[in-house]
Amino acid sequence: MLNINLKNLTNEELQELFNNIKKELEERKPKAEFTFDFEATNDPRKGIPYVARLFIDDDGKLQRQFYNMSKSYGKKEITISGKYNTKAGDVVEIRTGGSWKNDYRAWYYISENGEQLHVADIDNSQQKAKVEKYLKGEITAKELLE
């Protein structure tokens, strides 16, 4: 049993300990799994649609794990379709396509009840930074969604 004399800790140390305990308990909760359908068509020269799970690697860099989906090619278009499984608490990047000037991508948090909640546009650095803090464990899901 861990023996820590809480009376000897400063307020800052207590707050850090509390945050670490809260984070650890959150990580230990079993995560519900959800399946989503995806289908998007776009000109492949302007951006191929995809869905990817975002995560932070051992070096602290944002990475993508792409879901394998079927591809159907047409004349100057591609349709990506399929199902993907993800867990509550995950963040996924969904690209529905693009134009010559814009990339239609956004980041979504998967809630405990299986909703995809929009948390960042690909062009908004503040929103993206907040998501990266969540993925690194620096903020909670509640703080991410505020």
Image (tube, rainbow, N blue to C red):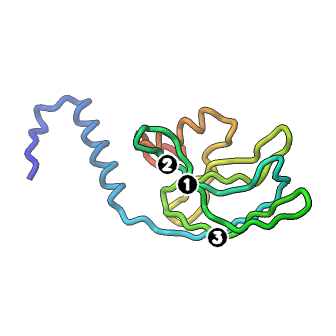
* Disc 3 target residue: 83
Vertical side of 97 occupied by 34: above or below: below
* Disc on res. 55: 2
Q: Secondary structure at mark 1?
A: strand
- Tell me which residue sits at (71%, 52%) in the image: 95
- Tell me which residue sits at (67%, 41%) in the image: 122
Vertical side of 95 occupied by 143: above or below: above
* Disc 1 target residue: 65
Q: Nearer the viewer, residue 71 or 96?
A: 71
- Tell me which residue sits at (60%, 47%) in the image: 119
Q: What is the spatial separation of the Cα atoms under label 3 and label 2, in whole angstroms?
A: 20 Å
- Tell me which residue sits at (80%, 40%) in the image: 102
Sequence order check, earlier mark of 2 and 1: 2
Asked if the residues shown at circle 2 and circle 1 are in contact, with their CB atoms under 8 angstroms apart, the answer is yes
Rendered-image quadrant of the C terminus: top right
The label nearer to you, 2 versus 1, is 1
Q: Secondary structure at mark 3?
A: strand
Q: Nearer the viewer, residue 28 or 42?
A: 42
Q: Amino acid at mark 3?
A: Lys
Q: Amino acid at mark 1?
A: Gln
Q: Amino acid at mark 2?
A: Phe
Q: Secondary structure at mark 2?
A: strand
Q: Position of residue 108 (x, y in %)?
A: 61, 52
Q: In the image, is 116 to the left or to the right of 132?
A: right
Sequence order check, earlier mark of 1 and 3: 1
